[in-house]
Amino acid sequence: MTPSENPTVYLVDDDVSMLRSLSRLLRTAGYHVVVHNSAAEFLEALPPDAHGCLVTDLMMPGMSGIDLQETLQASGNPIPIVFLTGHGDIPTSVRAMRSGADDFLTKNAPREDLLAAVNRALGHSAQIRANRAHQLAVRRPFEALTDREREVLRHVLRGLLNKQIAAELGIHERTVKLHRTHITTKLGVHSVAELTRMVQAAGVFGADSDL
């Protein structure tokens, strides 16, 4: 297993003594730990294929834990987050959880609670990673389609008949049939229903798709 595949617990806190204490606890429990004194430092060093979870202070100077959470979500790298706070700020914790935080603990929470939260977050990270790998595998056959075949496929998914697709694209109906044959052959499907399910599983042709 390469370093990028090893799960890492990233610690972010402006309190050096807190970082030292948490790092010692988690390393003693067998985790690979990387520490950062600020959210900005963490973001700058975070690898694009990060595998693990983030344990971060909620209230920090500069970029707060909530700001960090929003930045990670916008970056497309939704690493699971466990928030720590010494303030017990209920409204902020509710906001954090609604935005997808895996857990929210006070800094004086029992060590067993923290370790359990980290375990859950790492389990979530592994599931995210498995889901991404599956989606990439399902998406790969779509990369073999030509631009014209993608155009035809989009129209097929809209439920258009061959003659309607031909009229919209300004090509002959026989050409549409040929493209459809190429599409089903390349994707290994035999019906529009199978094709639709495959497209949905692959997440292609959505707003954020590059296919």
Image: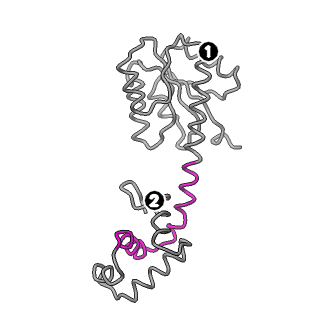
User: Is residue 156 positioned above or below 204 on the image?
Assistant: below
**Which quadrant of the rendered structure holds the N terminus?**
top right
**Which residue does the image show at 30% across and 80% down from the upper left?**
164
Q: Residues within 10 Å of mark 2 (few under 14, many from 20)?
A: some
* Quadrant assignment, res 141: bottom right
Tell me where residue 202 appears, x and y as whole percent.
49, 59
* The residue stretch that appears in magenta: 131-159
Q: Secondary structure at mark 2?
A: helix
**Which residue does the image show at 35% across and 55% down from the upper left?**
207
Q: Is residue 145 magenta?
A: yes
**Which residue does the image show at 40% across and 89% down from the upper left?**
174
The kind of residue on which mark 1 rests is Arg
Observer-nearest residue: 59 or 122? 122
Observer-nearest residue: 141 or 75? 141
Observer-nearest residue: 56 or 101? 101
Tell me where residue 68 appears, x and y as whole percent.
42, 30
Query: What residue does disc 2 label?
Result: 200
Query: What residue does disc 1 label?
Result: 111
Tell me where residue 65 appears, x and y as whole percent.
42, 25
User: Is residue 202 positioned above or below 60 on the image?
Assistant: below
Q: Earlier in the sequence, mark 2 or mark 1?
A: 1
Q: Secondary structure at mark 1?
A: helix
**Which quadrant of the rendered structure holds the C terminus?**
bottom left
**Which residue does the image show at 39% across and 34% down from the upper left?**
70
* Quadrant assignment, res 59: top left
